[in-house]
Image (tube, rainbow, N blue to C red):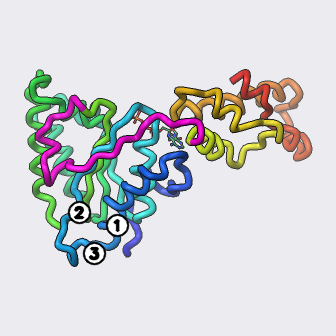
Amino acid sequence: QKPARGYANAAKGIKYEDIGGLGSEIQRVREMIELPLKNNELFKRLNIEPPKGVIMHGPSGTGKTLIAKAVANESRANFLYIAGPEIMGKYYGESEERIRKIFEEASENAPSIIFIDEIDSIAPKRENVTGEVERRVVSQLLTMMDGLEERGQVVVIGATNRVDSLDPALRRPGRFDREVEIGVPDTDARHEILQIHTRGMPITEEVQLDYLAKNTQGFVGADLKALVQEAAMCSLQRFLPHLNLDEEIPQETLEEIVVTTEDFENA
Ligand code: ATP
């Protein structure tokens, strides 16, 4: 397998082990995307077609982008990112042109994963479509997907938190015909996510991540990451008055800087 070239950078280094609590979702994504990218001959043997498009849906900050990057990185595929709302250009034809270019790039450098974040903003249900731009962009997207030749070598992942408001034309067979729901994490999943985000952070032994997990009902991955970072900032604020910032901080002093339960509570 060729190593990924160039613009895979956005996904570089992101692994499945960096994702907390989405074991079965990752498993499904791997079967749908990684398997055909890496072992297309299995699909040829069975004469079945791997998906061209997968929709990941669920609330914001639950790890949809993270999974897409991890699957690209772990399959050694290029990762091309499209931010739904940003692709909508002001000038006639600009958005379609951008989509066409990205698909071209993806095909030239296959295996590739094209990730379209907030796909509902470019492909809303037609009855909700107000502008002519959306109509043209959706039809360009569909044309590009229909035109993908070697199946399984370019996969498009669309992410949305409003799956019901997607244009149904997108979800026909041969287009985005698979779906994975990425939900809000439960207690165990929150525990795993907290463990991931505190890896390599000097937290004291009394910090009970399982207790924090129990008490963060409703937090998604992005919230938990923010919590951990804020706790570290609280620790920094405690230590700052004791540091002389004009001089290099001695190693022994650095080693005293730790994140405590109180920092988490303050955060
Ligand atoms: P959006 O719909 O807003 O784009 P998203 O579902 O794509 O959200 P991500 O961008 O993947 O969410 O998540 C934001 C950040 O939150 C990630 O980079 C990661 O640091 C953290 N995060 C989210 N979910 C998880 C998770 N399950 N495990 C570990 N970290 C997570």
Which residue carries the number 1 mark? 35
Q: Is residue 217 left or right of residue 108?
A: right
Q: Is residue 199 left or right of residue 150?
A: right
* Disc 2: CA contacts within 10 A as few (<14), some (14-19) or many (>=20): many
Q: Nearer the viewer, residue 97 or 132?
A: 132
Task: Please say if the residues under marks 3 and 1 sit with CB atoms less than 8 Å apart.
Answer: yes
Which residue carries the number 2 mark? 50
Q: Position of residue 24 (x, y in %)?
A: 44, 52
**Mark with earlier residue (3, 2):** 3
Mark 1: secondary structure: helix
Q: Nearer the viewer, residue 197 or 232?
A: 197
The CA span between labels 3 and 1 is 9 Å
Q: Nearer the viewer, residue 138 or 4?
A: 138
Q: Position of residue 186 (x, y in %)?
A: 53, 36
- The circle on residue 42 is 3
The CA span between labels 2 and 1 is 9 Å
- Where's the C terminus, which quadrant? top right
Residue found at x 14% / y 37%:
168
- The circle on residue 121 is none
Q: Which residues are magenta?
A: 164-188
Mark 2: secondary structure: loop
Residue kind at label 3, given as amino acid type: Leu
Residue kind at label 2, given as amino acid type: Pro
Residue kind at label 1, given as amino acid type: Leu
**Mark with earlier residue (2, 1):** 1
